Amino acid sequence: MNNGSSPVVLDSFHRPLRSLRLSVTDRCNLRCLYCMPEEEYKWIERTEILTFEELATLARVFMSLGVDRLRLTGGEPLLRRDLPQLVAMLRQSGLPQQPSSNGDSALSKPSLGLRDLALTTNGLLLAAQARDLRQAGLDRVTISLDTLRPERFRALARYGAIADVLAGVRAACEAGFDRLKINSVVIRGFNDDELGDMIAFGQRIGAEVRFIEYMDVGGATHWSSSQVVSRVEILDRLRGRFGPIESLNLEAQGAAPADRFRLADGTVFGIISSTTAPFCALCDRARLTPDGLFLLCLYAHQGLDLKRPLREGASPDELHALITERWQARRDRGAEERKTLRARGPLFQIEELRQDVHLEMHTRGG
């Protein structure tokens, strides 16, 4: 709830716009088989990438519409040079605002400010940047880590070293990120025998592990339903190792993507089951690609270009109106619609991805 003091824009299913994923780059220093399995990719031209100032401007407009959670994604966001500078700009933009004397402007309305500024990263470059990101005002870090075994990491990611990711995890803890999360995509026959080990790892470092069902989005051109390990199966396997598991979903607030659970010893973990149990009915999040395409759903085929009006001099109020109109018309329930398909394969074929870089997961962000 907004307590009546911050604007709320609702879509066709009365879902508010509360969370925004800002993809700051389409480049990545890994080539994970579930996200970027191909040998060659098209990239967004560097002149088309939004500047920090442009990102901050759009973020302010989104916050004027009720967005109070921002997450920086990619690609790999830490490849974007001077990222702590953007964090500081967003943190400043997200301070609670009081209405100005110009009551006619949409941006003059009061705002509750930014509740959460987070980052999702593969962790390879985090050791060198964690402290600066924390000092700049970043609240939380989520690190993607799908295996604890060096040989598997190399087979899955094809580049990098797991030692660098673990160094990033340690650096995040030392920098004061005390709500650390570890995201782990579970793929049958590859890493589904590490569920318990991943929970134990989270216990050792004080992080909450979140298992993610393998999703048929973006660049997942090798996806098949047979590789999906469902939430039900994940829970069954964890019960076999840890005993009774309590659901915390009745205690949950808002539209977080993960269902949360608690082991008998108090360890909390999550499962994001977008493939077998979608949460579209509660989804309050949108995405902005590195070149300013506004996407209403992770499964969306098209988006609204905000870069062009921004660079052509559109005022904040004009951008506000464009975003409002698009969100109010939103009827997207992509994951639910995918679940109903009898013959379900990859969302996009290689030929489609090569024609439109915005269809790629590494462009639209996770």
Image (cartoon, grey):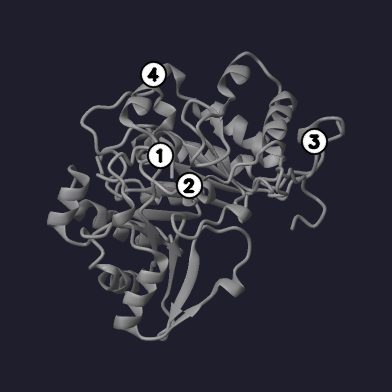
Q: Are marks 3 and 1 in contact (CB under 8 Å)?
A: no
Q: Nearer the viewer, residue 19 or 161?
A: 19
Mark toward the start of the polypeptide (2 vs 3): 3
Label 4, residues with CA under 10 Å away: few <14, some 14-19, many ≥20: few
Which residue bears the numbered disc 2? 338
Q: Position of residue 59 (x, y in %)?
A: 60, 36
Q: Position of residue 236 (x, y in %)?
A: 36, 76
The residue under the point 74% across, 58% down is 1
The residue under the point 30% across, 60% down is 170
**Separation of residues labelled 3 and 4 (CA atoms):** 35 Å
Label 1, residues with CA under 10 Å away: few <14, some 14-19, many ≥20: some
Of all residues, the one furthest to the front in this rendering is: 342
Which residue bears the numbered disc 3? 108
The residue under the point 62% across, 54% down is 281
Instruction: Tell us which disc is closer to us: 1 or 4.
Output: 1
User: Quarter of the image containing the C terminus?
Assistant: top left
Which residue bears the numbered disc 1? 347
Which residue bears the numbered disc 4? 45
Q: Are marks 2 and 4 in contact (CB under 8 Å)?
A: no
Q: Secondary structure at mark 1?
A: loop
Mark toward the start of the polypeptide (3 vs 4): 4
Q: Is residue 361 left or right of residue 139?
A: left
Of all residues, the one furthest to the top in this rendering is: 312
**Separation of residues labelled 2 and 4 (CA atoms):** 31 Å
